[in-house]
């Protein structure tokens, strides 16, 4: 009997796998690019991230992690001086401003501001104030992010987000940032890609703190909701105080990564794909919008509760979208789930499929779920060292963004990620995302053709017309 059941299960899985291999998902639909104009005041942005750009961050958990032998990072890269944005920010901001961009995002590195528990580094605070002031002077709408993956060494040694003291220091950090930077910030993001941190850091164990425990992953995922909500309240409360010289009503939200998921085959693949979509893309944001926490990992832990303190804590949402992923069930993969990039369609140097329609679909779904929440394309971009396909990538993603605006979805800006080449986490320096290439020996910034294209778009607040694209000025656009 047991054999019969086992054989049937194996047969079913084989059947599903074969169907999955045979099925050919449609490529992205195309929207012709022909001078589409964006609404007045639409934000054109790029940005930098502390650990991915600043360099010289030697006091956080990523720094310790990279030091290991064998190296956990591709090619054994170490972030080290990175692209020295910490010292060269003025040049980068100036390039962005010259390129007609009217918005910019940076973030703060916790380990610089609070290198030891309860000891603030005034110099670092002043440095960030100078950066934000420079952004203001250049006329940017200013986005500031408070946390993205890295923890001060002391915080990670104490147990990171699972530790109550660290959580209380997070709240203190947010308060301090509100006091220091309030008048200089237009849009606050509490954190970036929180679910990736919980899942890759605590379930897959691929990035610090490299834990492989789905129960802890779900707890941290839930904890980060609290961290967001409490940061939201702290910034709002500070703004309401007489000394809170913030905007009368600061806009607080978060920046979040989305995959556009599709099932490889049918039946179980569809089920698992929906589960993945919920956990990865929506559960956290749903909870922050409605207060309903509803996390359910197939064959794993689940949390179902109402938490009023989470409700309504998204004044805006930053959407990071890069690619589509195909999902299928695979008994040989951790958690029985296999994620794959399609290789039959054009893809980036790292092999991420280019699927612009996904940006439209994800953003439309976010608008449906979170009525009243303004949406900002906080990251869209690709690694393409030779700039072969980046221009076309930008045009196609913007054509879909334009369609969203045209259809009345509340999208108020677009960010190309990133202004310069940078540190792509566990992939090291190999992926080149920048509009500007960086020579890491001299730290010289050199615009790729895509920088010219993005400049045209930002300055004119529209896409090039078909006629213009045929002309010599755009001969680098392989359209
Ligand atoms: C992250 C960036 C990263 C990009 C591409 C984004 O969601 O915020 O840090 O470079 O994805 O992987």
Image (cartoon, helix red, strand yellow):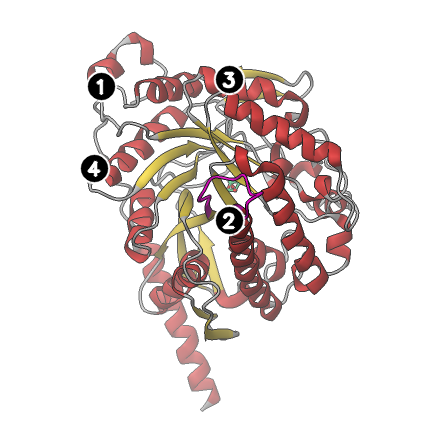
What is the secondary structure assignment of the residue under circle 3? helix
The residue lying at 33 percent from left, 34 percent from top is 397
Question: Is 386 situated left or right of 215 in this image?
Answer: left
Q: How far apart are the alpha carbons under marks 4 and 3?
A: 30 Å
**In the rendered image, which residue does mark 3 sit on?**
95
Nearer to us of marks 1 and 3 is 3
**In the rendered image, which residue does mark 4 sit on?**
406
Question: Is 199 situated left or right of 473 in this image?
Answer: right
Residue 240, numbered circle: 2
Earlier in the chain: of badge 3 and badge 2, it is: 3
The image quadrant where one finds the N terminus is bottom left
- The foreground one among 36 and 135 is 135
Q: Does the residue labelled 2 lie within 8 Å of ligand 1?
A: no
Q: Which stretch is magenta? A: 239-252
Earlier in the chain: of badge 1 and badge 3, it is: 3
Return the x and y of residue 244 as percentages of the image width and height: 56, 43
Q: Can residue 192 be seen in this view?
A: no
Q: How far apart are the alpha carbons under marks 1 and 2?
A: 47 Å
Question: Is 92 situated left or right of 366 in this image?
Answer: right
Question: Is 14 situated left or right of 191 in this image?
Answer: left
Q: How far apart are the alpha carbons under marks 2 and 4?
A: 36 Å
The image quadrant where one finds the C terminus is top left
> Is the Cβ of the residue at disc 1 closer than 8 Å to that at disc 2?
no
Q: How far apart are the alpha carbons under marks 3 and 2?
A: 36 Å
Q: What crowding class fits label 4: few (fewer than 14 Cα within 10 Å), some (14-19), or many (20 or more)? A: some
Nearer to us of marks 3 and 2 is 2
Earlier in the chain: of badge 4 and badge 3, it is: 3
The residue lying at 51 percent from left, 58 percent from top is 229
Q: In which quarter of the image is residue 467?
A: top left
């Amino acid at each position: 009997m047991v054999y019969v059941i086992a054989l049937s299960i194996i047969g079913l899985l084989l059947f599903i796998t074969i169907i999955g291999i045979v099925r050919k998902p449609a490529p992205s639909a195309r929207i012709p690019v022909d001078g589409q104009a964006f609404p007045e005041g639409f934000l054109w942005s790029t940005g930098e991230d502390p650990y991915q750009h600043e360099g010289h961050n030697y006091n956080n958990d990523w720094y310790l992690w990279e030091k290991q032998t064998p190296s956990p990072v591709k090619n054994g890269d170490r972030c080290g001086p990175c692209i020295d944005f910490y010292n060269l920010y003025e040049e980068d901001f100036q390039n962005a401003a010259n390129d007609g961009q009217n918005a910019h995002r940076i973030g703060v590195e916790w380990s610089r501001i609070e290198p030891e528990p309860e000891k603030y580094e005034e110099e670092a605070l002043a440095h960030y104030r100078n950066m934000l002031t420079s952004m203001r002077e250049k006329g940017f709408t200013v986005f500031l992010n408070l946390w993205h993956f890295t923890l001060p060494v002391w915080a990670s040694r104490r147990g990171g987000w699972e530790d109550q003291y660290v959580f209380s220091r997070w709240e203190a950090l947010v308060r301090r940032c509100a006091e220091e930077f309030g008048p200089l910030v237009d849009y606050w993001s509490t954190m970036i890609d929180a679910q990736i941190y919980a899942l890759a850091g605590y379930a897959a164990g691929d990035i610090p703190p490299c834990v492989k425990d789905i129960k802890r992953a779900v707890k941290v995922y839930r904890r980060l909701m609290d961290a967001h909500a409490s940061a939201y309240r702290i910034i709002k409360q500070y703004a309401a105080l007489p000394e809170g010289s913030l905007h009368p009503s600061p806009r607080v939200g978060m920046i979040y990564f989305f995959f556009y998921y599709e099932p490889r085959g049918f039946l179980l693949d569809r089920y698992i794909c929906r589960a993945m979509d919920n956990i990865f893309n929506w559960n956290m944001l749903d909870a922050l919008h409605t207060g309903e926490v509803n996390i359910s990992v197939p064959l794993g832990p689940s949390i179902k509760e109402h938490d009023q303190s989470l409700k309504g804590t998204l004044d805006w949402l930053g959407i990071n979208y890069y690619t589509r992923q195909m999902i299928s069930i695979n008994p040989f993969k951790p958690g029985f789930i296999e994620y794959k990039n399609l290789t039959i369609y054009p893809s980036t140097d790292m092999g991420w499929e280019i699927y612009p329609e996904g940006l439209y679909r994800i953003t439309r779904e976010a608008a449906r779920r979170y009525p009243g929440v303004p949406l900002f394309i906080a990251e869209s971009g690709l690694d393409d060292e030779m700039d072969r396909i980046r221009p076309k990538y930008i045009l196609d993603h913007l054509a879909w963004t334009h369609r969203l605006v045209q259809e009345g979805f509340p999208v108020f800006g677009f960010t190309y990620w990133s202004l310069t080449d940078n540190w792509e986490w566990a992939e090291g320096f190999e992926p080149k995302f920048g509009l500007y290439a960086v020579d890491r020996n001299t730290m010289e910034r050199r615009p790729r053709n895509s920088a010219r294209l993005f400049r045209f778009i930002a300055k004119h607040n529209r896409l090039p017309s078909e006629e213009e694209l045929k002309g010599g000025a755009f001969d680098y656009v392989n359209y």
